[in-house]
Structure formats: structure tokens, C-alpha cells
């Protein structure tokens, strides 16, 4: 009985303890809020959640798996070496050994795809790395050692191998594999080009690879890969263009023009598809690569065409068509519908380069410069009617190109500042270009400008106009004032130059007072300082008392009048409306 009563007492004590615990828990639950967890639960969460230190700690399980996959990769490579040893021993034909090697690599490519589909990312990456390690060296040996592939055939095999690996990397999200394949394919192509001395197939492969990784960057946002591949592609295309005229090479200008056309078509076509069809904003890679494509592709094609004469007219017509189309896309689509400012500047810049290079290839001097001058006037008029700052800048570029191409600027500088006689006579073409520059400066000056950067083209236009006008006047008047040939009066020529420059200073000061041409007035004081330096270096050593009196009189008159003219016209400003 005592034992039974003792047991009952123990049970009663335990029941009391349990009741107190239940009450304690209930009180804690009542005291807690919905947004606050108990200390015990927080401690439990902290014990269940690994800390940052533990997350960064060495994971032995992960390391074991890496070592295991590395061992499996070595076994895969051992199988490849077995095939190579059998082939080297002559047990099987070389073509069969190389073919079996590619089949073996393809089998592991399939295994990599299956592992990626099953979510085994690390295993898929090791399988794919095995494919790259087997395939690229096998292609090099098949080309150089066994002579199974021509340079074109090796480029096709390399394209297929690289394309399959990049497709796998893109499908399964293996960015590291994309890097390895891209850099490995680039190195393999360079090796094959260096050993075979044939550049065109490898250059075409690099252009295709650069385009592919650019699109992978669009799709997967792997943007780092495209930079080195595009750089190598641009450099190799440039080398192809430079070597096109080399008599020691088997690849002529036709092959070089093909490579440059593919470079322009693939990259600019890709950029147009993304920015126009997909409606995306142009990115820095596209801006820089487009500039590189224009320099290497368009500029290289101009170089090859001018040196060889092959395809010059056709390439010029194509460039003109592309230039007009780019302007139409920029103004009819991007400006009106898409309304992405970066894309608008991108396509107008491309159009400018295409139109300049196309007319430059299609026409010779003096027709080329006259056409550029006409384009300058046309774009200046369009800039004024559309209130477009972009077209105003383009008008200035065409005008400067016309002045440089016709020799107006270079000959004017020589006439004004160099030598003791003038042997240049302005032709009809240079006079037409000068008139075009003047019309462009007048029309473009009335176009809208809103900041200092947009005022730079008008300043350049006025500088070209002043130099060209003064040089032309001196060239016309020098035979009458200073004589011709060995009997030219150096003092009279120096004074004539000074008088003409003083007239230019007064003209710029007056023009700076008119609305929209304030930039012309900016040139007045720099020109005054330059004339003073010129008189010290030329007029004083070469002049005579009569010529010096005239030179100092005119210069003194300019020093008196220019500050007064500028003070009255300081309020003249250019229009600021437009976009």
C-alpha cells in the first residue's frame, strides 16, 4: 500500500509540474505579439540558420565532389589519349582516328547536356570542359600534323564545335563554359592562322564568334565575354585589310573586302535588330564596336579599294544607300516613334560616316568636294527648317570635309603665312566650296544651340571661312600688288596679308553682332593677337617704310574699332529652341 500511495504521489507531482509548464507557455503566448517571436524560437532559428562565417567555411563535401569530377575528367582525357596513341602508331588511319576523336568529344557533349538538363551544373561544366580540351587540340593536330583539313575546312569545323558548345552553355546557363569556349576558340583560330599563313577563314570565324557572343550577352546578360572577342576580331580584320595589297600573300583584295563586308553586316545588322526591332537602347559596347567596325570595316574597305581599285564604285554606291537609309531610320522611325535619344545619335552618326565614305569612294576630286559642299548647304538648310542641332553639326562636318578635300584650307594657310611668293590660283571648284562654306555658316548659325558643346561646329565653320576667304583674296590680289615669280615683293606681300587679315577681323566683329552668329565675334580678339605676332615675325623683317606705314595704320585702326564693335554686339546670342 505504501508503494502504491508513493507512486500516486509521484504522478500527482508530475501532473502539477506539467500543469505549471502549460500555464507558463500560455502566459508567454498571451504576452507575445504577432510580429515578435519568442526568445526560444529566435534561438532555434539562429541554430538552424548557418551564419555567414559558416557559409563561407570550407565545404568538404563540395571539395570532394570537385576532386571526384576532376578524376572523371582525367579518365575522359585518358580515353582521348588512347585514340591518339592508336592513331600515332598507325593501327588505324589518321582520318579515322581524328573522326573517332570528334565522335568521342560529341558523346561527352551529349553527356554534358543531359547533366545540365538534370540540374547537375557542376557535372555538366566538367563534361563540357572535357569536350573543349579534346576538340580544340584535336582540330589543330588534324590540320597541321595530319593535313586532313584545309584552312577553310578547319574554320568550318571550329565554327561547328564552338557553336555547339556555346549553344550548350546558353541553354544550361553555364557562363564559365561560355568563357572557356570563346577564349579557347579565339586562341585556336589565331594558332591556325599563324601556322597556315591564311587569314581570311580564321577572320571570318572570329567575326562570327564575336557576333554570337554579342547575342549571348543580349540573351543571358553575359556582357564581359563580348569585349575581348570583338577586339580580336577587329584587329584581325584590320590585318587582313593591310595585307591585302601584299604580293607575297595568296589572299587578294577581293577576300579582304568580303571579310570587311561580313564584319559590317553582322555587327551593324545585329545592333540594328536589337535597337530598332527589339526597341532597346544602344549600350556602350554597341557604340564603341560600331565605331571600330566603321574604322576597320568601312575605313579598311576604302583603303583596300583605293589601293586595288576593286569594287570601289560598288562599295561607294552601297555606302551611299546605307547612309541615306540610316538617316531615314533616324528621323522617320527613331525620332518620331521610338524617341530614344541615344539611338538617334547612334544612327545619324553612322549615316554621316556612310555618306562621306560612299561619296569619297564613288567620286574623285574636284567633284567629291563640290558634292560635300552641296551636302553641307543642304543639311544646314534642313537644320534651320527642322530646328535640329544634329543636322547643324553634320552640315559643319560636310563643310569641313569639302574644304579639306579640295585643298582650300591647306593652300590658304600656305598663301597667308608661308613663303615669299604665291603660286596658287583659286579654281572654280575651290571657289564653289568656299561659297558653300559661307552659305553653311550662315544657315547653320541660325540653327538652335543650347550649350557650349553645340557652339563648337559654328566656331570651326567660321575659322574655315575666315582662312579660306583670306587665302583666296590674297591669291587673287598678290599678282597685282606684289608681282609674280622671283620678282615678288616680300614687303608688299606681307602688307597685303596683314590688310586682308585686318579686314577679316572687322568682318567677324560685325558678324558677331547679328543674331545666331555670336561665335564669329569670338574670333576677333584671337585674330588681333595673331596679326600682331605676324607683324613682328614677317612685316618688320621684310617690310619697307611705305609698306610698314600701311600695315601699322590698318592694324591700329583694327585695335580701335574691334573693341567698340564687340562692346555694342555683346548681347547677340544664338537661338536655343529645338532638339
Image (cartoon, rainbow, N blue to C red):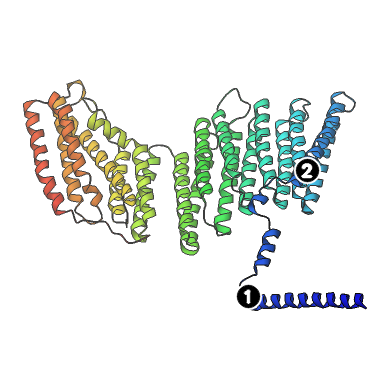
For the residue pair 158 and 257, the one nearer the viewer reads as 158
Q: Position of residue 334 (x, y in %)?
A: 49, 59
For the residue pair 528 and 166, the one nearer the viewer reads as 166
Q: Position of residue 237 (x, y in %)?
A: 57, 35
> Crowdedness of circle 1 by 10 Å Cα count: few (<14), some, many (20+)?
few
Give the left or right position of residue 199, taking residue 156 as reference. left
For the residue pair 22 and 450, the one nearer the viewer reads as 22
Which residue carries the number 2 mark? 64
Which residue is at a point 21% across and 37% down the rendered structure image?
473
Which residue is at a point 53% across and 48% down the rendered structure image?
286
Which residue is at a point 66% across and 33% down the rendered structure image?
187
Give the left or right position of residue 298, taking residue 196 as reference. left
For the residue pair 280 and 255, the one nearer the viewer reads as 280
| Figure quadrant of the N terminus | bottom right
| Figure quadrant of the C terminus | bottom left
Name above or below for residue 417 compared with residue 505. above
Q: Position of residue 272 (x, y in %)?
A: 55, 53
Q: Residue furthest right?
A: 1
Question: Of helix, strand and loop, which one carries label 1?
Answer: loop
Q: Position of residue 369 (x, y in %)?
A: 37, 41
Q: Residue furthest front?
A: 2
Q: Which mark is residue 168?
A: none
Q: Which mark is residue 32?
A: 1
Cα–Cα gap, marks 1 and 2: 46 Å
Q: Earlier in the sequence, mark 1 or mark 2?
A: 1
> Crowdedness of circle 2 by 10 Å Cα count: few (<14), some, many (20+)?
few
In this rendering, the label closer to the viewer, 1 or 2:
1
Residue 482 visible from this viewpoint: no
Give the left or right position of residue 536, taking residue 25 as reference. left
Amino acid at each position: 500500500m505504501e508503494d502504491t500511495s508513493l507512486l500516486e504521489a509521484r504522478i500527482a507531482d508530475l501532473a502539477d509540474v506539467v500543469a505549471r509548464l502549460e500555464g507558463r507557455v500560455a502566459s508567454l503566448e498571451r504576452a507575445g505579439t504577432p510580429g515578435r517571436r519568442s526568445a526560444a524560437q529566435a534561438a532555434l532559428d539562429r541554430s538552424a540558420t548557418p551564419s555567414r562565417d559558416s557559409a563561407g567555411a570550407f565545404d568538404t563535401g563540395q571539395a570532394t565532389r570537385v576532386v571526384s569530377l576532376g578524376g572523371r575528367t582525367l579518365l575522359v582525357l585518358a580515353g582521348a589519349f588512347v585514340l591518339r596513341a592508336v592513331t600515332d602508331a598507325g593501327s588505324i588511319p589518321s582520318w579515322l582516328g581524328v573522326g573517332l576523336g570528334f565522335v568521342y568529344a560529341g558523346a561527352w557533349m551529349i553527356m554534358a547536356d543531359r547533366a545540365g538538363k538534370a540540374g547537375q551544373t557542376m557535372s555538366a561544366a566538367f563534361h563540357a570542359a572535357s569536350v573543349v580540351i579534346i576538340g580544340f587540340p584535336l582540330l589543330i593536330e588534324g590540320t597541321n600534323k595530319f593535313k586532313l583539313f584545309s584552312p577553310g575546312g578547319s574554320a568550318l569545323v571550329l565554327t561547328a564545335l564552338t557553336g555547339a558548345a556555346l549553344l550548350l552553355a546558353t541553354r544550361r546557363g553555364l557562363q564559365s563554359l561560355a568563357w572557356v569556349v570563346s577564349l579557347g576558340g579565339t586562341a585556336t583560330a589565331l594558332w591556325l592562322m599563324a601556322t597556315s599563313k591564311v587569314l581570311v577563314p580564321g577572320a571570318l570565324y572570329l567575326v562570327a564568334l564575336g557576333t554570337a557572343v554579342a547575342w549571348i550577352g543580349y540573351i543571358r546578360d553575359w556582357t564581359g565575354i563580348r569585349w575581348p572577342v570583338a577586339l580580336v576580331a577587329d584587329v584581325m580584320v584590320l590585318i587582313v585589310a593591310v595585307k591585302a595589297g601584299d604580293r607575297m600573300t595568296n589572299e587578294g583584295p577581293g577576300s579582304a573586302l568580303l571579310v570587311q563586308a561580313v564584319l559590317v553586316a553582322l555587327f551593324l545588322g545585329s545592333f540594328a535588330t536589337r535597337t530598332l526591332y527589339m526597341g532597346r537602347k544602344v549600350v556602350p559596347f554597341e557604340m564603341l564596336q560600331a565605331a571600330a567596325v566603321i574604322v576597320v570595316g568601312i575605313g579598311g574597305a576604302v583603303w583596300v579599294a583605293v589601293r586595288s581599285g576593286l569594287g570601289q564604285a560598288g562599295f561607294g554606291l552601297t555606302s551611299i544607300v546605307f547612309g541615306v537609309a540610316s538617316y531615314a531610320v533616324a528621323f522617320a522611325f527613331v525620332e518620331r516613334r521610338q524617341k530614344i535619344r541615344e539611338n538617334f545619335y547612334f544612327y545619324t552618326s553612322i549615316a554621316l560616316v556612310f555618306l562621306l565614305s560612299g561619296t569619297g569612294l564613288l567620286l574623285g576630286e574636284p567633284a567629291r568636294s563640290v558634292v560635300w559642299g552641296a551636302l553641307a548647304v543642304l543639311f544646314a538648310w534642313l537644320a534651320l527648317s527642322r530646328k535640329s542641332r544634329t543636322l547643324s553639326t553634320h552640315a559643319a562636318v560636310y563643310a569641313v570635309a569639302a574644304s579639306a578635300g579640295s585643298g582650300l584650307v591647306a593652300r590658304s594657310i600656305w598663301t597667308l603665312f608661308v613663303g615669299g611668293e604665291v603660286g596658287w590660283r583659286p579654281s572654280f571648284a575651290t571657289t564653289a566650296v568656299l561659297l558653300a562654306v559661307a552659305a553653311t555658316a550662315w544657315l547653320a548659325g541660325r540653327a538652335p544651340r543650347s550649350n557650349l558643346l553645340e557652339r563648337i561646329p559654328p566656331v570651326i565653320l567660321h575659322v574655315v571661312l575666315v582662312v579660306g576667304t583670306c587665302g583666296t583674296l590674297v591669291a587673287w590680289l598678290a599678282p597685282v600688288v606684289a608681282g609674280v615669280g622671283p620678282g615678288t615683293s616680300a614687303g608688299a606681300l606681307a602688307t597685303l596679308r596683314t590688310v586682308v587679315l585686318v579686314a577679316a577681323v572687322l568682318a567677324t566683329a560685325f558678324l558677331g553682332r547679328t543674331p545666331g552668329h555670336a561665335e564669329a565675334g569670338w574670333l576677333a580678339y584671337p585674330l588681333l593677337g595673331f596679326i600682331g605676332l605676324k607683324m613682328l615675325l614677317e612685316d618688320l623683317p621684310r617690310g619697307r617704310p611705305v609698306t610698314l606705314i600701311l600695315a601699322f595704320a590698318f592694324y591700329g585702326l583694327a585695335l580701335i574699332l574691334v573693341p567698340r564693335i564687340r562692346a555694342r554686339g555683346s548681347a547677340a546670342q544664338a537661338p536655343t529652341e529645338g532638339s
